[in-house]
Image: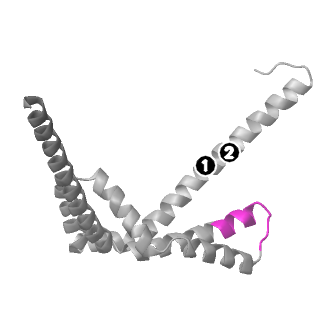
Amino acid sequence: MKHRIILIAVLLTTVTSTIRADEALAERKDLAVTVLNAMNFCDMIEQTLDQMKEAQQKNLGMRGMTTSSADLERTFSIIRENMPCDDMKQEMAGIYAEVFTATELKGIRDFFTSEVGQTFNSKQPELMRRSMEVSMKRVNAAMMKAMEEMRRERSGAGSGGSTP
């Protein structure tokens, strides 16, 4: 009988702890939604997709490949259909709730609702665009270097010569 009482007490404690943890996670998720709203998350998704489409057009042009504007528009239309803002916001809120504490989420929310936070947010698309340009230049240079090195290795191996 004593063991049953102890087992029941342990189970009740575990269930209570689980309920509290679920409530805390739900609170953090609600806070995360306010953070994402303060960050203008839906606008950010749209701007990001627009930048991706522009980058895709440039990338195809640099490679000498062509695609019709209609094909590119259709592709990004399908992408947008599969990324509805409210669904994305809920998924991202779940991630934020798992990664950040309630205190951290409140601080992030306070930042993004401040004048400085709003200024930062309004400049975020420009920062992202310019960051992508810098990154892509480096990635493209590294890819060219890697391709050149592999070409040399293959040509050296094919001729029976050794490579340095």
Which quadrant would residue 153 be assigned to in this image? top right
Q: What amino acid is labelled 1 in the image?
A: Val
**Residue beneath the point at 68% across and 70% down:** 57
**Spot occupied by residue 107 in the image (x, y as percentages of width and height):** 19, 61
Q: What amino acid is labelled 2 in the image?
A: Met
Residue where numbered disc 1 is placed: 139
Q: Quadrant of the C terminus?
A: top right
**Residue beneath the point at 50% across and 65% down:** 129
Contact (CB < 8 A) between labels 2 and 1? yes
Tell me: 163 left or right of 58.
right
In this picture, which residue range is highlighted in magenta? 56-67
**Spot occupied by residue 41 in the image (x, y as percentages of width and height):** 38, 72
**Residue beneath the point at 58% across and 67% down:** 52
Give the colouring mode of the picture.
Answer: one colour
Depth order, front residue of 123/43: 43
The disc label shown at residue 65, or none: none
User: Is 64 within the magenta?
Assistant: yes
**Spot occupied by residue 149 in the image (x, y as percentages of width and height):** 74, 34
Label 2, label 1: how far apart the Cα atoms are: 6 Å
Please, what secondary structure does the residue beneath circle 2 have? helix
Depth order, front residue of 108/126: 108
Please, what secondary structure does the residue beneath circle 1 have? helix
Residue where numbered disc 2 is placed: 143
